[in-house]
Image (spheres, helix red, strand yellow):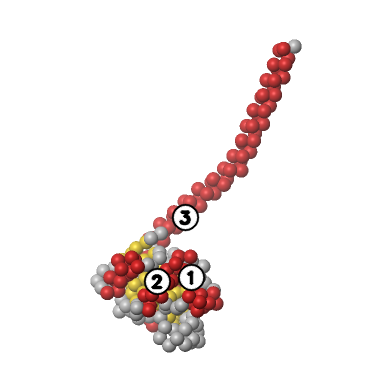
Amino acid sequence: MPIKKYTLKNSAFKNRTLVKHQQGAARWIVILPLLLCLGLFFILYIGMQTASRDLPSALVGKTLPNFLAQLLPVSSIETEAQSPIQSITGNDITGPALINVWATWCPTCRVEHAYLKQLSDQGVKIYGISYKDDPQAAQNFLQQFGNPFFLNILDSTGEIGMELGVYGAPETFVIDAERKIVGRHIGVVDERVWRDILQPLLNNNDGISVTNEF
């Protein structure tokens, strides 16, 4: 009889062990695909980031591409009067100036907006490119928080951004008096970026620069 009890206990132990193994295997069946997806996403993300760093260097040192686009109807810095939508080409942009690619859906753009307004109040000419954004949302944003842009160009489809090699927002280009792109900065524009990177390029167009803070 003692042998029989031991056999029953041993059998129950084996059953519990088997159940635990099966449960563990089931968990891995669920977790493993998730891990594979995360790994694939990480690889794609790194590849896209690398590509975004490589794209802009092709345009720095070259003339700003020509394009045809519409302007966002907001109050201009010069007249403070709202003007109707009108067309603009890349040839109409004059430097020295900054070209800031922004969007209302971009959190970093909201962070830098107040400083861009401060620069424009000091006389820095800044063109805006409203990138893949809703025109009404962009208009409401500028009316609420102020308009730092000399002119704001609509790029709802992202075609202008594609010509510039833009990967996302915010990105800021520096152009000289001959419309040559002499610098490009990826990331927020703040006092340090203005002082150390953008302002020297506006004041002295002999050098070119590409900076990336992402």
Label 3 vs label 2, nearer the camera: 2
Residue in the picture at 44% in, 74% down: 129
- State the separation of the CA atoms marked 3 and 1: 21 Å
Judge the density around disc 3: few (<14), some (14-19), many (≥20) Cα neighbours within 10 Å: few
**Label 3 element class:** helix
Q: Amino acid at mark 3?
A: Tyr
Gap between marks 1 and 2 measured at Cα? 16 Å
What residue is shown with label 3? 45
Residue designated by label 1: 103
Q: Amino acid at mark 2?
A: Tyr
**Along the viewing direction, whichever of 177 and 144 lies nearer the viewer:** 144
Tell me residue 94's x, y (percent).
35, 81
Residue 17 visible in the current orientation: yes
Query: Residue 35: x and y, percent?
Result: 54, 45
Residue, x 54% and y 74% (percent of image)?
A: 137
Q: With 85 as the anchor, is 198 left or right in this view?
A: left
Q: Is residue 24 above or below residue 192?
A: above
The residue to which callout 2 is attached is 115
Picture quarter with the N terminus: top right
Q: Which of disc 1 and disc 3 is earlier in sequence?
A: 3
